[in-house]
Image (cartoon, helix red, strand yellow):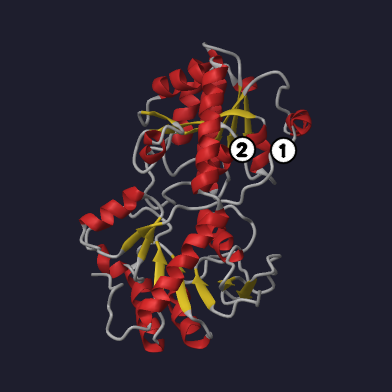
């Protein structure tokens, strides 16, 4: 088979290590798994990616300790569209009026079609049409798609996020992982991997811990990246509360780790009791990664995670209710058969819907259709509407 010649220019945050952001992980996964197209992603200078079917553009310039200025971020995309040889532009970005106008205008001048994947659930959809650059607009959950349709956005598609699926970590390696992170060898593990401050998830989990321990012995892990001083202060508050409850020896605090897969490999249950998903990826990649490893999952029953609850692949509990969370987790720890059933259902769900190879194939079919429509005179079939 000949090498792909049609190039897709991906406009997004820098696609490079550390792989701690869901949006850039998704861009990387889609672009690297194309078969009939060739992707070009944006990086900082000096970054080399290992994926062979992938071009890089060091458009973000030298890496600095401070965030790229807004003016450069806005103008950068228009300049790239004007300069690059490309068949199609794919924007992975939140709904943003300024960015949408820049991308739409630059692409129109070049006669290039644009696909826009909303990488974050919008806080509000009121007047969102002008903040969307693409035709069509791709939503990562049906919940977000329904919100856009209700606002009158006609050309929307649902393409779920995808992750790279890997062979499970061997059972014989799990004791070594526990020793590496100083986790007791004989206690089931309950993990929360998420933010300290975006929602009340970490506080809800901490408040549920003593209630879970009244039902059964276990060990808790908080794997939360420290991004700023406010995160550090929140971690200190949670540590103080856990110490006051007299359960500090049951809890391990881990920040950024080399491999979350290792932690999921030793976990019996993962919790994600986030009460808000606005300005975050609709379905957090870390949640899918845990499910892919066969970890039974409990989430706050709030859209869009209700889609997973309704599919029967996770348990849902009311948000910000530690007692309900403790009951659900305790039940799973005490009932091994139920826990295994839920774990297997979640794993099947991820493998059939969120395999990045399947997701990339869906995007390629979309690219085919968008390019075919773009060739038709005055078709206008993919207008934002």
Give the crowd class for mark 2: few <14, some 14-19, many >=20 residues within 10 Å.
many
Per the rendering, the mark at residue 348 is none
For disc 1, the marked residue is 169
Q: Residue at x 24, y 57 (%)?
A: 149
Q: For the C terminus, which image quadrant?
A: bottom left
Q: Where residue 179 sits in the image (x, y, percent)?
A: 77, 29
* Label 2 SS: loop
Q: Where residue 286 sits in the image (x, y, percent)?
A: 54, 44
Q: How many marks?
A: 2
Give the crowd class for mark 1: few <14, some 14-19, many >=20 residues within 10 Å.
some
For disc 2, the marked residue is 293
* Contact? badges 1 and 2 (CB < 8 Å): yes
Where on the picture, by quarter, is residue 150? bottom left
Where on the picture, by quarter, is residue 377? bottom left
* Label 1 SS: loop
Q: Nearer the viewer, residue 129 or 201?
A: 129
């Amino acid at each position: 088979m000949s090498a792909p010649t049609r190039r897709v220019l991906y406009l997004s945050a820098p696609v490079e290590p550390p792989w701690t952001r869901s949006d850039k992980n998704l861009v990387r996964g889609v672009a690297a798994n194309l078969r009939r197209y060739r992707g070009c992603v944006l990086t900082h200078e000096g970054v080399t990616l290992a994926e062979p079917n992938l071009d890089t553009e060091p458009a973000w310039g030298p890496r600095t300790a401070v965030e790229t200025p807004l003016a450069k971020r806005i103008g950068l995309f228009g300049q790239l569209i004007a300069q690059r040889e490309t068949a199609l532009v794919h924007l992975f970005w939140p709904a943003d009026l300024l960015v949408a106008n820049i991308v739409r205008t630059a692409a129109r001048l070049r006669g290039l079609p644009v696909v826009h994947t909303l990488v974050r659930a919008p806080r509000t959809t009121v007047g969102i049409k002008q903040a969307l650059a693409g035709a069509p607009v791709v939503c990562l959950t049906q919940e977000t798609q329904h919100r856009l349709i209700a606002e009158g956005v006609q050309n929307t598609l649902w393409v779920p996020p995808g992750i790279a699926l890997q062979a499970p970590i061997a059972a014989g390696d799990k004791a070594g992982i526990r020793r590496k992170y100083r986790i007791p060898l004989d206690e089931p593990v309950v993990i929360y991997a998420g933010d300290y401050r975006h929602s009340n998830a970490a506080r809800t989990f901490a408040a549920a811990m003593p209630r879970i321990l009244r039902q059964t012995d276990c060990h808790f892990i908080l794997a939360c990246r420290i991004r700023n001083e406010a995160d550090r202060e929140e971690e200190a508050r949670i540590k103080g509360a856990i110490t006051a409850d007299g359960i500090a020896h049951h809890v391990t605090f881990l920040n950024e780790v080399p491999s979350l897969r290792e932690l999921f490999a030793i976990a019996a249950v993962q919790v994600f009791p986030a009460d808000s998903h606005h300005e975050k990826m609709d379905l957090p990649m870390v949640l899918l990664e845990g499910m892919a490893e066969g970890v039974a999952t409990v989430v706050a029953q709030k859209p869009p995670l209700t889609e997973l609850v309704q599919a029967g692949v996770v348990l849902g509990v009311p948000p910000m209710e530690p007692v309900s969370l403790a009951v659900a987790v305790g039940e799973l720890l005490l009932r091994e058969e139920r826990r295994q059933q839920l774990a297997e259902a979640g794993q099947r769900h991820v493998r059939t819907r969120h395999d990045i190879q399947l997701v990339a194939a869906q995007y390629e079919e979309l690219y085919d259709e968008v390019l075919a429509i773009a060739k038709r005179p005055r078709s206008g079939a993919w207008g934002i509407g």
